[in-house]
Amino acid sequence: MTGACLALTGCNGIPPEPFVVARAASSTPQPPAPVTAEALRPAFDAFAGQHPGGLALAWAPVGEPERVQMLGQTRDLDAWSTIKVPIAVAAAANASNERAMIRVETHTRAAIRRSDNQAATALWRSLGAASAAQDKTEAVLRAGGDERTQAAEDATGRQRGFGRTVWLLEDSARFASMLPCLPDTEFVLADMEKIDPDQQWGIGALEASTRFKGGWGPSDHGYLARQLGIVDSASGQVAVAVAVQPEDGRHATAAATASASVTWLVGRLGPADSGVCAAAAPTAG
């Protein structure tokens, strides 16, 4: 052998050890996991223990109603004025001309911003007879991911005023999670962003941008206050629903507890708990 040993064989005829380049471990951060009700339950139980009575929270990423989470419970589930949201959407879909739509928008402004019951009744009646109003409101609920609620019926199926609709809190959160994704809901959402100052409790007490609607009244087992709404974040939007049935039966207590509860929940949610409406599917051309 002449000259230097061949690099591929080595000087003793044995191939050299292969040259291995060490690869650094991937530094790509793992996406955060969503918060689960089970993970929050111990802290929630401790929090709820400071607020005697019934308390419940539900949430879901916008656009993903199947991911609803739920904590707590209240004895009663009357929708009260939160049901005005799907009624307003149904009335808009039912408006047959521009003049009718102007009336719907006028009544919606009062029904949502001020929670005016006469305006909400006008929206309900614009849907036709009671059975037609029920069917059209339920069609909106189904489009929003709520497969169970029967409008204007109590838990036994008895016909009641629309405010006494039994609306499970998790179903109202499902509906809220799809509300921005439904067609022709912009005007309702715009009014939900301008709730009167004296109703700015619960979701309305958050510093984030929100759209919400509250409802309250004397239910079968005490005073009940509840809300549904949408909270904005840098990573998307999360739908939140809250229900409070305070032991002392006072609205002030219910409102304060709702504010504390929503603040407690939203402070524990992260980017994986928010979502956005899916892009519209392309149409065939």
Image (cartoon, rainbow, N blue to C red):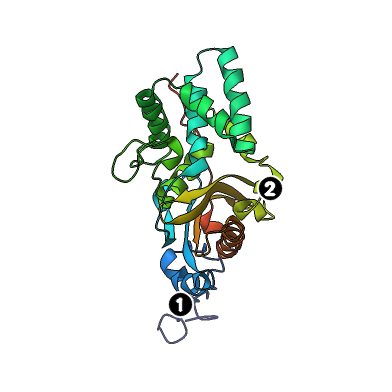
Nearest the camera: 232 or 227?
227
Within 10 angstroms of label 2, few (less than 14), some, or many (20 or more) residues? few
Residue toward you, 153 or 237: 153
The numbered mark at residue 109 is none
Residue 209 x/y as whole percent: 67, 48
- Percent from the top left, x then y, of residue 98? 59, 13
Q: Toward the viewer: 141 or 52?
A: 52
Instruction: Name above or below for residue 127 compared with residue 88.
Output: above
The residue at the point 64 percent across, 38 percent down is: 114
Residue 152 is left or right of residue 236, and the answer is: left
**Residue, x 44% and y 70% (percent of image)?**
41
Residue 132, relative to residue 145: is it above or below? Answer: above
The quadrant of the image that shows the C terminus is top left
Query: Callout 1: few (<14), some (14-19), or many (20+) C-alpha neighbours within 10 Å?
Result: few
Residue named by callout 1:
18
Coordinates of residue 228 in the picture (x, y in percent): 52, 47
Q: Secondary structure at mark 1?
A: loop
Judge whether residue 114 can be spotted in this image.
Answer: yes
Q: CA distance from mark 2 to mark 1?
A: 76 Å
Q: Residue furthest left?
A: 156
Report the residue that reaches farthest toward the bottom: 12
Amino acid under disc 1: Pro
Element assignment for label 2: helix
Mark 2 and mark 1 in contact? Answer it, CB < 8 Å: no
Type of amino acid under label 2: Asp
Q: What residue lies at 50% left-to-right and 25% top-to-bottom? A: 91
Give whichever of 57, 124 is nearer the camera.
124
Mark with earlier residue (2, 1): 1
Asked whether residue 183 is in view, the answer is no
Q: Position of residue 21 (x, y in %)?
A: 52, 74
Q: Is residue 45 left or right of residue 210?
A: left
Residue at image mark 2: 198
